[in-house]
Image (cartoon, rainbow, N blue to C red):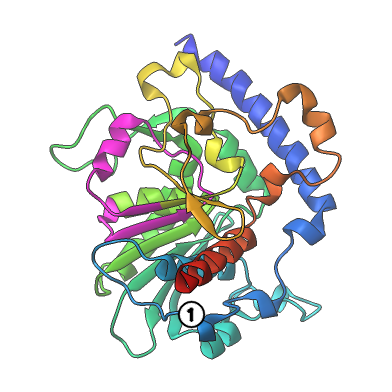
């Protein structure tokens, strides 16, 4: 029980840092704000169409999914009336003019949002896309990282020592009760995707639903090694843009012992102008990409390890990677 007072202290420190970063993000609106409409699915005419394959890795598929994750931050039909300026990108118009998909379900709960997309022609993959962090309440849940036992969704024969991030777990439960009745009626393959918090929710949802593909962008660590064993053999594409800070959180803590958070899956790291690599030392993802003593100086302007988290950066580098491959 001595573990929990320490968690309360760590969570308070994490929440304070999150609030500090959130304030900085508000000041750097031009860096972190919603992209203008022309950026969504930019270049789609020159890229291979979305074509889900049951095996292998495909950069084009990853790019399309990253763009759906960017689209997740736009207002859906329920949210459009709140746009008093009328300047925000229109999701339905973007889908109609630039994709072969339509949104068949849009769910909101506790400030979180998930959409289901299906091909307009009715055949092909079902895409489940979770929105990332947009509200202060979600920042608070991000900070509640004490491990929660993986019990409610545990299937017979699965590990009893799996643990997940408690904040993500709470948010997922609220969404899943409304998402699952619709999803189970839709055809496979099921593709779960999301950016940031959305990537964490996609990882949990993909595990529960036994998704055919889980593809995340800038997602934090979700569970311990025992939880990650649930996904052994599952197709998971985990992308990290350069030095994205969020993918390194929560940081290791010796007091967690076997409840330590880890990704459990190697990352596709996007660097430079369209290069896809990996971390030479996987333990780099357990360290901050800056010196804590330099944090105040680092935050004088938008640091790379924060701007690298922006979904637009993932979309841009993936597109460059495709063109680079086509030129080879």
Q: Residues within 10 Å of mark 1 (few under 14, many from 20)?
A: some
Task: In the rendered view, tell whether residue 308 sits above or below residue 149.
Answer: below
At 54% across and 36% down in the image, what residue appears?
248
At 74% across and 45% down in the image, what residue appears?
22
State the quadrant of the N terminus: top left
Which one is nearer the viewer's eye here, 174 or 12? 12
The image shows residue 257 at horizontal and vertical percentages of 39, 16
Which one is nearer the viewer's eye here, 49 or 251? 49
314 is within the stretch colored magenta: no
Which one is nearer the viewer's eye here, 64 or 135? 64
Q: What residue is disc 1 on? A: 47
The image shows residue 117 at horizontal and vertical percentages of 41, 75
198 sits to left or right of 309: left
At 28% across and 74% down in the image, what residue appears?
186
Element under disc 1: loop
59 sits to left or right of 69: left
Task: In the rendered view, tell whether residue 245 sits above or below residue 45.
Answer: above
The image shows residue 65 at horizontal and vertical percentages of 46, 67
The image shows residue 240 at horizontal and vertical percentages of 52, 48
45 sits to left or right of 266: right
The answer to whether residue 115 is seen in the rendering is: no
The residue lying furthest to the front in this view is 328
The answer to whether residue 8 is seen in the rendering is: yes
Task: In the rendered view, tell whether residue 62 sits above or below residue 309.
Answer: below
At 51% across and 34% down in the image, what residue appears?
285
Q: Which residues are magenta?
A: 208-237
Task: In the rendered view, tell whether residue 53 sits above or below residue 268.
Answer: below
């Amino acid at each position: 029980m001595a573990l929990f007072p320490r968690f309360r202290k760590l969570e308070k420190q994490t929440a304070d840092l999150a609030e500090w970063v959130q304030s900085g993000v508000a000041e750097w609106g031009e860096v972190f704000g919603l992209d203008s409409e022309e950026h969504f699915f930019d270049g789609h005419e020159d890229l291979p169409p979305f074509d889900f394959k049951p095996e292998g890795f495909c950069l084009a598929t990853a790019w399309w999914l990253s763009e759906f994750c960017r689209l997740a931050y736009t207002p859906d039909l329920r949210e459009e009336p709140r746009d008093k300026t009328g300047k925000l990108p229109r999701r339905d118009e973007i889908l109609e003019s630039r994709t072969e998909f339509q949104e068949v379900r849009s769910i909101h709960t506790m400030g979180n949002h998930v959409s289901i997309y299906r091909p307009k022609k009715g055949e092909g993959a079902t895409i489940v896309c979770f929105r990332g962090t947009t509200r202060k309440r979600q920042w608070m849940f991000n900070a509640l990282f004490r491990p929660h036992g993986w019990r409610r969704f545990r299937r017979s024969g699965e590990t009893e020592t799996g643990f997940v991030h408690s904040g993500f777990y709470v948010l997922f439960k609220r969404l899943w009760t409304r998402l699952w009745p619709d999803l189970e009626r839709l055809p496979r393959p099921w593709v779960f995707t999301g950016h940031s918090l959305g990537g964490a929710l996609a990882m949990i949802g993909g595990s529960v639903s036994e998704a055919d593909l889980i593809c995340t962008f800038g997602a934090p660590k979700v569970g311990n090694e025992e939880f990650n064993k649930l996904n052994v053999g599952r197709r998971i594409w985990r992308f990290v843009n350069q030095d994205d800070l969020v993918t390194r959180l929560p940081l290791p803590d010796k007091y967690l012992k076997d409840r330590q958070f880890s990704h459990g899956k190697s990352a596709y790291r996007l660097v430079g102008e369209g290069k896809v690599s990996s971390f030479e030392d996987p333990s780099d993802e357990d360290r901050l990409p800056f010196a804590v003593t330099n944090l105040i100086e680092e935050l004088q302007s938008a640091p790379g390890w924060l701007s690298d988290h922006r979904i637009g950066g993932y979309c841009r580098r993936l597109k460059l990677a495709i063109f680079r491959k086509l030129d080879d």
